[in-house]
Image (cartoon, helix red, strand yellow):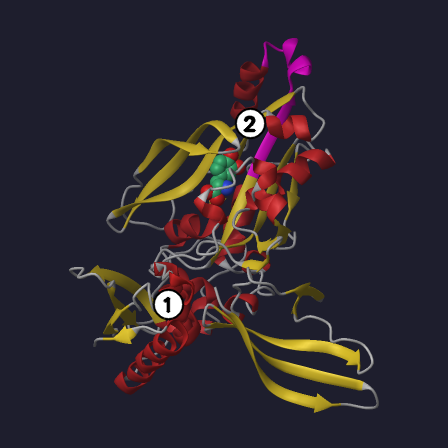
Amino acid sequence: MRLAFTPRNLSRTSGAFVGLSGVIRVRGITQFRFQWRKYSTKEPPSPPTIQLEGRHYLIDEWTNLSSHISSALPRKLHLQPSHPLSITRRLIESRFPGPTYQYHNDLSPIVSVHQNFDSLGFPINHPGRSRTDTYYINKDTVLRTHTSAHQADTFRSGTSDGFLISADVYRRDAIDRSHYPIFHQMEGARMWSRDACKARGGVPAVIREEIESMPKHGINGASEEPLRVRWVEAYFPFTSPSWELEVYWQGNWLELLGCGVVQQSLPKNADIPDKIGWAFGVGLERIAMLLFGIPDIRLFWSLDKRFLEQFKEGEISRFVPFSKFPSCYKDVAFWLPSSSSAAGGQVSFHENDMMEIVRNVAGDLAEDVDEFTHPNTGRKSLCFRINYRSLERTLKNDEANSLQKAVKRVLVEEFGVEVRG
Ligand code: DAH
């Protein structure tokens, strides 16, 4: 891995204070514009930091956060009252009433590696921990990849038997109409004391009773097609047994939620060893796409009135597309540098690196990115098709060409690849 910075501006302010700003590149990708904090010329400069939510975080060789991602931190779509994600959140919350359930909707997305992974029993070699999948602020700090990151703390706080945590979560992932590097989840959990349930027929009987008495609603969603769902057995490090609920959407089975019986290590570590319970984590975009008939996950981020003004707090309405603008695809094929010529003798280029480059260059104008496989002749060759489309206007071919040129430039300059076409 390479970590380099390019000073952009050395400025002398008053007296002994000097400011320095520049650009941090990690593995070639421009990750962050940074500012050295002011320092006295008599003291050594403080190390580079990123400022997020008003706090400074040290940058290190794990940092892989792009400004496209960090600038979205303040959006908090799930808290905008007339936004479909907030309407969806409120609808689910209404089925899990207080005081049994407490809602936590404003927990910071910046969490420790311990909260996100260790506290949930993720093995040290779990792929979710890798820099290709997770946004690291530095080696100890990440943008939460799931709302489960708050389970252990919330169990320990012991302020209610049940809780719902709704929040933005961050994952380096594919670019297509159902994946976006930021999405929203709701974590639900409910614990019971085994002793307290004995007199009422045991925990399973109490749970059944409670399910019966939960508020019901008769919502079918805005889809014209009958809803097809299926339960699939699953594995999560923090539940056993575990399941996923999948739904059929645009020709594919999509995961809607994961759930299970909470691993006993969690209540034990939270000093409530007598308790047992269930937990789930549900993707709010996926529920909202079904409920409102929203065809592309990028729409949730739209600031276009034609999108936002279609929705009203407390109401579920079918999304009316304002128009389908034409798409424009461009291919890029390239050779990776051979491992012998690469720094450290190792070439690593992950599909998610490509996604990150495209996202940084094209933002929400990239609709999907597909990888094609080419016959391999010793050197590794990759080919990607990038589909550009604006959801709000017609994208000109010239504009798509210059985006494509910028993607190629980053590939060559930052990753040392040889573009073939
Ligand atoms: N955190 C999991 C994910 O993002 C979803 C999940 C699975 C949450 C099982 C849970 C659970 O609370 O019990 O994929």
Q: Amino acid at mark 2?
A: Gln
Q: Secondary structure at mark 2?
A: loop
Nearest to the observer: residue 48 or residue 93: 48
Q: Quadrant of residue 79?
A: bottom right
Q: Is residue 371 visible?
A: yes
Residue 62, image x, y percentages: 55, 59
196 in magenta: yes
Q: Residues within 10 Å of mark 1 (few under 14, many from 20)?
A: some
> With respect to residue 332, does 398 lie above or below?
below
Residue at position x 80%, y 83% from top?
A: 41
The earlier-in-sequence mark between 1 and 2 is 2
Residue 305, image x, y percentages: 47, 73
Q: Amino acid at mark 1?
A: Ala
Name the front one of labels 1 and 2.
1
Nearest to the observer: residue 126 or residue 319: 126
Residue at position x 33%, y 84% from top?
A: 402
169 sits to left or right of 191 = left
Q: Quadrant of residue 202?
A: top right
Nearest to the observer: residue 281 or residue 66: 66
Q: Is residue 281 visible?
A: no
Distance of label 1 from label 2 (alpha carbons): 44 Å
> With respect to residue 143, does 208 lie above or below?
above
Highlighted magenta segment, given as a residue range: 188-202
According to the picture, the residue beneath numbered tag 1 turns out to be 342
Q: Residues within 10 Å of mark 2 (few under 14, many from 20)?
A: many
Nearest to the observer: residue 313 or residue 238: 238
According to the picture, the residue beneath numbered tag 2 turns out to be 263
